[in-house]
Each structure stands twice: as C-alpha cells, then as structure tokens.
Image: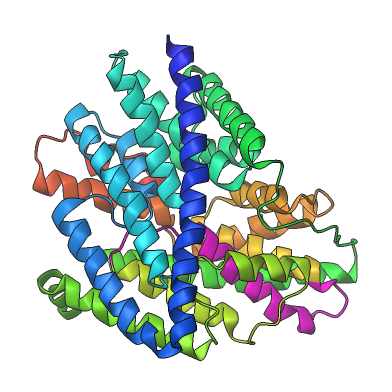
C-alpha cells in the first residue's frame, strides 16, 4: 500500500506539473495579447493584477504567498499534524496554482517551479492522509518525495529532483526515506517522458571550456554570480522582514497598495527593458543558451530588479526560472570581456553561478543546469563555478535563502498559532538565523 501511494502520487505530481506548465504558457500568452493591444496597458494591468492577487491570497489562500519551497521546508520540521495540514491543504495548493497563473498573466517576474514543489508535496501528503497511513515519519517522507517529484516533473530533470531533496529540502539523506524519494522521482520522470517527450528545458548546447586561459571565465562568473546572488537573497530576506521599520509598518497596514506600487515598478522595468522582464524569463534564457538572443545590455539587471519587486509584492510565485534567466543574462554581459572563452560557455557559467549564489545549494545548481542543457562537457567547469559562487555568496548573505524564509515562516506560525510544537530552535543548524 505504501509503495502504491508513492507510485500513484508521483504520477499525479507529474501530471500536475505538466498541466501547470501549460497553464503558465497560457498565462504569458494572455499577457502578450494584452501588450499587443497597447504596451501602455501594462501600467494598469500589472498594479491591478498584483493588488488583486494579494487580496485573494490574504483573504482566501493564506499560506500560498511566495515560492512555496520555504513552506515545504517548514512542514518537514513541524511536529504538529494540524499545522502541516494548514500549509499543505488542497485549498492552498489550488490557490498557489491559480494565483501564480494570475501573476504571469499580469507580467510578474515569477516562476512555476517553486510552487510546483509545494503542490507536489501537498498531493503526496494528501494522498497518504486519505489512505490513513501511519503519521509523523511517513508524513515527512511523503512531503519530501512530493517536493522532489515536483522539481523532477517541472524541469524534466530526475537527478536534480533527487539532489534537491537531499541538499535543499532535508539537508540530509536518511536511509529510511532515500528509496521512497528515488521511487517518486523515477515515476514522475517516466510520466513526464511519456506525456511530453524527452525534452531539455533550455534546449541543447554542446559548448565546452578547455582547461587553460579560458578558465578565467570560471573565476569571473563565480565572483559576479556569487555577489549578485547573495545580494538577491539578502533583498528577499529583508523584504520578508518588512524592509525598514517604517516600510514594514506601511506594508502591514496597506499590503494591497504596496502590491499595486510594486506593479507600477514592474511595469516601468518592463518598459525600460523592451518587455524582456515580464514572465518567467524562460524564452530569453533559452535563446541565450542557444546563442540566438538579441537582448539589451542591461537585461540581467532589469530581470534581477523585476524579480525582487515581484517577490516583495507578496504574490504567489517562484524564483527558479527568473533566477536562471538573470544568470544567463549575466553570463551574456560578461562574455565580451572574456574573449578566450566561448560565449555559450560563459552563459552557462553565469547561469550556474548566479543560481548557486541565490539558493546556496551548489550541487543542485550544477545538476539542474547540466540536465536542463543536456551538456556533460561542462560538468567540471560548472561544478567549480557553482562551488566558488556559493562561497562568494556566503560572504554577502550568511543565511541560505530558503532556510531563512522557512525559519521566518515557522516563527510567524508559532506567534499566530501556539499549538505548533516545532520551534525556531528545533530547525537544523543550516536553517538557523545565526548560522
């Protein structure tokens, strides 16, 4: 019965990931259609859409805001089943999907991959509860497997799903859950392969970086990506803390007006970038990886700012795809300064450096970029860049982004609902604010 739960659950997660991906494409098509009528409409659509999303989130879907990955991490470190059910409820999962699509239809710089993790964990957890499987350890194993299957299904990257569960979600590899996670990822991968084919998320590239002078690109991309990624993490953590005291008070009292203001900033950034900052950034990143993009020189900066503003607004939505787009843009900007290295290779190095700097999970960053581009030739340069960028990012932001957000989420739940027995002190060292 337990094996059947993991198999069926993984199939459902894969189906959800595919439908979610199609919905995200449709949402962005809607936004492009609106822009086709008149580009200036973005100054109405973005503020109104973000404000509406915040209203719906706060009134009907509390717990759906943000990426979704911090919520899953928090659920893994809770001991109270009632609190876990509130985080991983069907209502929150539905709101997560629909409001992420609403954000994309309004031009927000968000991704669907983080939300897919939370919804995947909800599906697996809910299936286990419906069959009345044993509690506590089984619940955690289901949540972990569902989150990992969500990443595998969202990116079509089975290895990344496993590594993500180990390095980011659980920070450990317990023998009791390793087989279940692996099974869920494999089943989700098979379902995705059968339904949409063996695609690569960012296309295929065969570039390589020979050892020698061209490895200067590894150092340059590591420094730039690590610094930028660490700064991004600090800004998002600061946003979760309310920015400054006065800004925090304003956001608490007027969250809808603040979201509308973020929408205006998002519209302005999109206008300045020629419309390249709206949406996930998937199309721009893929063109950069394949060497076909004609983007403005400041694309990385504009996309960086648009993603920060989108997250600060408080709407549901992830940062995976936008972060990979920022990293690709960063590599594209550095390529002319590194004539000894192929420009395509520098784009990949920039992508892995920035992503590693943001999530501070270097192995996950390496595997995701390697699998998404079907390029094993770059394995060693990607790994070296990712590890160096991780070290640089730690100098800027000492706390891992998702761990810090998960800890704040736990503290907020403790404050609002004393029934939760998991405390901030019980969160592993990797998630402690002083770590």
Horizontal arrangement in the rendering, residue 323 relative to residue 81 (left or right):
right
Seen from the viewer's position, the closer of residues 47 and 317 is 47
The residue located at (34%, 86%) in the rendering is: 43
Magenta stretch bounds? 314-343
Horizontal arrangement in the rendering, residue 3 relative to residue 336 (left or right):
left
Occupied quadrant, residue 241: bottom left
Q: Position of residue 171 (x, y in %)?
A: 47, 38
Q: Residue furthest front?
A: 37
Q: Residue furthest top?
A: 1
Main SS of the magenta part reads helix
Say whether residue 432 is visible.
no
Q: How many marks?
A: 0
Q: Is residue 326 magenta?
A: yes
The residue located at (85%, 71%) in the rendering is: 342
Say whether residue 378 is visible.
yes
Q: Position of residue 58 (x, y in %)?
A: 17, 58
Q: Position of residue 88 (x, y in %)?
A: 29, 37
Seen from the viewer's position, the closer of residues 337 and 252 is 252
Seen from the viewer's position, the closer of residues 303 and 384 is 303
Q: Decide: is 268 above or below 214.
A: below
The residue located at (78%, 57%) in the rendering is: 381
Occupied quadrant, residue 433: bottom left
The quadrant of the picture occupied by the N terminus is top left
Q: Decide: is 163 above or below 322.
A: above
Seen from the viewer's position, the closer of residues 366 and 159 is 159
Q: Is residue 288 magenta?
A: no
Q: Decide: is 115 above or below 137.
A: below
Give the colouring mode of the picture.
rainbow
The residue located at (46%, 31%) in the rendering is: 12
């Amino acid at each position: 019965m337990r094996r059947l739960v993991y198999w069926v659950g993984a199939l459902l997660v894969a189906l959800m990931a595919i439908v979610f991906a199609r919905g995200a494409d449709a949402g962005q098509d809607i936004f492009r259609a609106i822009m086709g009528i008149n580009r200036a409409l973005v100054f109405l659509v973005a503020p109104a859409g973000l404000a509406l999303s915040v209203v719906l989130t706060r009134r009907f879907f509390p717990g759906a805001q943000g990426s979704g990955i911090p919520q899953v991490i928090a659920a893994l470190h809770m001991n109270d089943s009632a609190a876990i059910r509130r985080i991983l409820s069907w209502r929150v999962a539905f709101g997560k999907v629909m409001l992420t699509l609403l954000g994309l239809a309004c031009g927000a710089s968000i991704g669907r991959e983080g939300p897919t993790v939370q919804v995947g964990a909800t599906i697996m957890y809910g299936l286990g509860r419906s069959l009345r499987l044993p509690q506590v350890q089984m619940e955690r194993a289901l949540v972990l497997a569902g989150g990992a299957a969500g990443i595998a299904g969202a990116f079509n990257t089975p290895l990344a799903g496993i590594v993500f569960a180990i390095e980011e979600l659980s920070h450990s590899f317990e023998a009791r859950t390793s087989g279940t996670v692996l099974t869920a990822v494999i089943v989700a991968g098979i379902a995705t392969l059968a339904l949409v084919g063996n695609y690569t998320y960012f296309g295929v590239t065969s570039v390589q970086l020979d050892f020698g002078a061209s490895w200067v690109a590894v150092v340059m991309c590591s420094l730039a990506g690590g610094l930028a990624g660490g700064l991004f993490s600090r800004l998002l953590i600061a946003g979760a803390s309310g920015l400054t005291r006065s800004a925090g008070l304003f956001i608490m009292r007027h969250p809808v007006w603040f979201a509308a203001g973020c929408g205006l900033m998002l519209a302005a950034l999109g206008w300045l970038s020629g419309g390249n900052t709206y949406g996930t950034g998937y199309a721009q990143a893929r063109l950069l990886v394949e060497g076909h993009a004609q983007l403005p020189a400041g694309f990385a900066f504009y996309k960086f700012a648009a993603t920060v503003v989108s997250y600060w607004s408080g709407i549901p939505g992830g940062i995976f795809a936008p972060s990979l787009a920022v990293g690709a843009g960063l590599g594209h900007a550095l390529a002319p300064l590194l004539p000894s290295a192929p420009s395509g290779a520098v784009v990949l190095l920039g992508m892995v450096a920035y992503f590693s700097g943001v999530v501070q999970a270097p192995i996950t960053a390496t595997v995701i970029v390697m699998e998404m581009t079907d390029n094993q030739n770059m394995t060693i340069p990607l790994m070296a860049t990712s590890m160096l960028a991780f070290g640089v990012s730690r100098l800027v932001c000492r706390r891992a982004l998702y761990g810090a957000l998960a800890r704040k989420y736990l503290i907020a739940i403790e404050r609002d609902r004393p029934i939760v027995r998991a405390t901030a002190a019980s969160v592993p060292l990797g998630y402690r604010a002083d770590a």
